[in-house]
Image: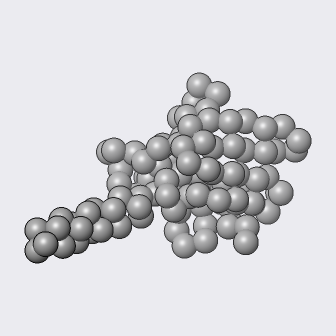
Amino acid sequence: MKKILILLSILLVVGTACSSGPTKQAQGKWQNDNGDIINVKGEKFKVTMKGSTIEGDIKDDKDHKELSKVKFVGETAYIKVDDDTLSIIESPGDTPNDEAQFKKVK
């Protein structure tokens, strides 16, 4: 019984650590000041701009723990989430412009 409790404790710690990755934080609907919308569900990334929709894949970036890597239309971009702001950058270390910053839609 004691071994089972220890195993469950370890699984809970590992599960909690895995669930707070950048892709998990990016889940949901986001919108910028221009009305562009980003939807992240699971490992799918969808951007809607002026009636057009682009879909791609999103995964945690193995080389940059605080970033998610997005691949769509043959391009790669990175996503960073700080509280209720999602930022899109071209490469790690870049600073996003105003159009690339999205607020969480509640």
> Which residue is most to the top?
74
Judging depth in this view, the residue of 56 and 74 nearest the camera is 56
Q: Quadrant of residue 35?
A: bottom right
Q: Quadrant of residue 56?
A: top right
Q: How is the image coloured?
A: one colour
Q: In the rendered view, would you say 47 is above or below 32?
A: above
* Side of 76 where 100 appears, left or right: right
Q: In the rendered view, would you say 9 is above or below 54?
A: below
What x and y, as percent, mark residue 66?
A: 40, 58
Asked if one can make out residue 90 in the rendered structure from this viewpoint, the answer is: no
What x and y, as percent, mark residue 69?
A: 48, 43
Q: On the rendered image, what quadrant is the N terminus found in?
A: bottom left
Residue at figure coordinates x 54%, y 43% from the top left: 43
Judging depth in this view, the residue of 65 and 12 nearest the camera is 12
Asked if one can make out residue 8 in the rendered structure from this viewpoint, the answer is: yes
* Side of 10 where 33 appears, left or right: right
What x and y, as percent, mark residue 32?
A: 75, 60
> Which residue is most to the front?
1
* Side of 24 where 37 appears, left or right: right
Residue at figure coordinates x 41%, y 61% from the top left: 19
Residue at figure coordinates x 56%, y 58% from the top left: 26
Q: In the rendered view, would you say 20 is above or below 41?
A: below
The count of marks equals 0
> Which residue is most to the right?
51
Residue at figure coordinates x 68%, y 36% from the top left: 55
What x and y, as percent, mark residue 14?
A: 27, 62
Q: On the rendered image, what quadrant is the C terminus found in?
A: bottom right
